Amino acid sequence: MRISFLFLLIISSLLFSCQSKFNETIVALDSYKIEDGFNLEVIAAEPLLKAPVAIDFDAKGRVWVAQMPGYMNDLQGSGEEDPSGSIVILEDLDNDGIADHSKVFMDSLVMPRALAHVYGGLLYAEPPYLWFVDIKDDKPVNKVMVDSMYAVEGNPEHQPNGLELNIDNWIYNAKSNFRYRRKAGKWEKEPTTFRGQWGITHDNFGRLYYNDNSRILLGDYALPNTFINNKFFTPKSSLDKLLTNDQRVYPVFAGSVNRGYAKGVLNADSILVNATAACSPLVYRGGEFTESYDENVFICIPEGNLVKRALLTFTGDSVFAKQAWQEKEFITSTDEGFRPVSLKNGPEGSMYIVDMHRGMIGHHAYMSPYLRDKAKAKELDTITNFGRILKVAHENSTADKIPDFNTLNGSELVKLLSNENGWIRDRAQHFLISKEANDAIDEVKDVALNSENQWSQIHALYVLEGLNALTFDFLTTIIDKSNSQVASHGLVLLKEFASTAHIEKALVLFNNVIKRNEIELDLYLGNGLGTWMNLDESKFTPIMMKILARKPDNNTLADAVIGGLSAVDTEVYNNSVIMDSLKHTPFVNKLARTISDKNAGKMNAIFTKEKTTEDTRTSGAKMFFQICASCHGAGGKGIEGLAPPLMNSEHVKNTERLALIILHGLEGPVHVNGELYNINLAMPGLIRNESITDKDIANIISYVTNAFSDKPKRLSTTRIQELRNVKSSSGMEFTEKELQALDK
């Protein structure tokens, strides 16, 4: 008995000591309001987190976080290049649903921005690189560079990010025109449509959605990389589409917005009217919210301290969105530190919000004097080193315990392909492929052929694609017996099996598909016909004609067909019978432009673009801090006895005068805002530096007018070239009087 008592005492002491190490930060959410029927809770917060920007879940359902604490710690963005970033693993040691421990997986990173658990390891972005590491005991091993030019240019707001593993087994990115996958142990990279700015998501069918600052939701009408096989055609009617014209946002208080000085940005109560920093949309696929929320899109509006909800409508050849409510949002807060920057579907069906939680959310390259004054008045630059992960769950959620995918065999993974939760289905598909579960192929085929759940069927098809287990005959069976969405994927995959041996069977199949008269099927059949026409144009051209004649004015259909005509587009264009029968249709007009571009050697830009280009203000900011800040100050306030201020200077607001000063220089005295600066030193002109181009000057002007005036302007390189030849009386630096005379 005594031994037992001592044993229990020791165990209790150990438990108590462990319990005391739990570090669960309690965060009040009194200033937050969420839609009725939902619960909002903080599952992790500072000090476990610091400036989180992206999350993903591992095979056990644990949250992994990419952190960027070097971002905008002051109004000048100091320390941005410091290796202060990290990737951490959040753990819930007492199993109460709240993280109580943060484990560092990798530190000393510079601005890490995205991560994804794939192929048993971690894919992550640390500009300019995209890396992959294996994971052993929660530590990185076997580091491999996937892409050395992943994010070469731009600033943290304008560099590739996202790393969204789609149903087609490819990994897609926002702010990028490349996609990635690993096959047979080797990483592949190929062009794709350029998409969005920050964050990317997919629906159950596999379409992609994204956005930019001022447009809350963009998307593709078609599956990725299906309409771009013709390198000389750009399918503008079906890809990168604005899905709603309604850009209204409904914050509950007057926050601080960078463009608040511009007409129409704020209402009479100084409340934001339209989005200016929309990011990271998420198609909800969790299966735990009520049915009306299935495939709704949630959108981060960090400048408005809210999360928006939009509804999708699918028509077969297009997608439309509308806001769920007017004068209302899904989540709002009066906490100006609430900065939702990323959303994720969770393993148990909840939705997770990455709250960077800071005062300054916009990059210093874009900061206006208006926002700088607001930030100082509210001390927003002091809200740093925070970060939260929030979970949104339905009040009636009955989610099951998350399985550990590492422990599941092939049959168990196959069963999960039919789960209601899209995250579970995605992960099961990926694990079947990465584990090379060939012993489960027959079970997967059974799901593809016989499941009553169309999404399960599609997932099963791509498991088979990933395992190289598809055949022409199997796909024809799928197409014949499945609904239009499953059959559409079958038609996409069938292109890989085009051969002379399959021509007769393909003809029978395609004629059966046409008889169904479903626009979705017509799109993907029409898109694949070019591959078959290259084998036998005479047999497959009539099928193309039937499809186009049925809907001659359909722009999406025209995009689909031309996008697949790569090998035979010239032959089709030169066929007078085809051209005359479809005269004045979008197909003929678009094909004519395609052939013109082909003859001129003008490809779709995605096939010639090697990297994301840097925007003018970011490039200008770099040059300003290298050349100008040492005299004028990083904040443009000037330095006594050395240089006058730039903030709200009349010399900044006049772009041509500014260009002349930058090019040729300025000697004092000079007035700024009515105050005389009797500076003896002359500012040298950059014209004497042959390495500085007209574009460089234009970039400096773009940054300076934005940073130090409320009227950002640009000046063309053509005009800058002309101003190189405008000289002062001395042939050296201009005087203020000479500049004023030129204004007249």
Image: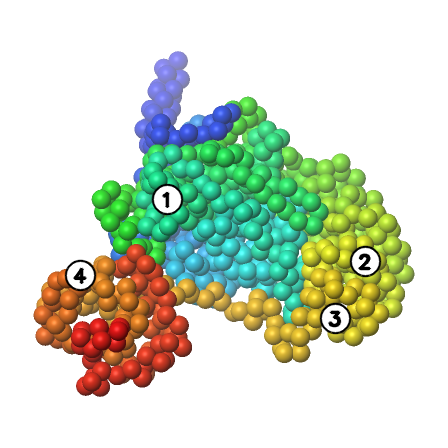
Q: Of circles 3 and 2, which is in front?
A: 2
What separation in Å lies between label 3 and label 2 (alpha carbons)?
A: 18 Å
| Tally of numbered tags | 4
Residue underneath mark 4: 673
Percent across and percent down for residue 703 are 33, 64
Nearest to N terminus: mark 3 or mark 1: 1
What separation in Å lies between label 3 and label 1 (alpha carbons)?
A: 50 Å
Q: Of circles 3 and 1, which is in front?
A: 1
Asked if disc 3 and disc 1 are in contact, CB closer than 8 Å, the reply is no
Which labelled disc corresponds to residue 549?
Answer: 2
Callout 2 amino acid: Ala
Residue underneath mark 1: 266
Nearest to N terminus: mark 3 or mark 2: 2
Asked if disc 3 and disc 4 are in contact, CB closer than 8 Å, the reply is no
- Looking at the image, which residue is at 63% across and 78% down? 600
Callout 1 amino acid: Leu
Residue underneath mark 3: 569
What separation in Å lies between label 3 and label 4 (alpha carbons)?
A: 63 Å
Q: Of circles 3 and 4, which is in front?
A: 4
Q: Residues within 10 Å of mark 1 (few under 14, many from 20)?
A: some
Nearest to N terminus: mark 1 or mark 4: 1
Nearest to N terminus: mark 3 or mark 4: 3
675 vs 119, left or right, is left
Q: Is residue 302 visible?
A: yes
Percent across and percent down for residue 142 are 49, 58
Give whichever of 163, 684 is nearer the camera: 684
- Judge whether 23 appears above or below 128 on screen: above
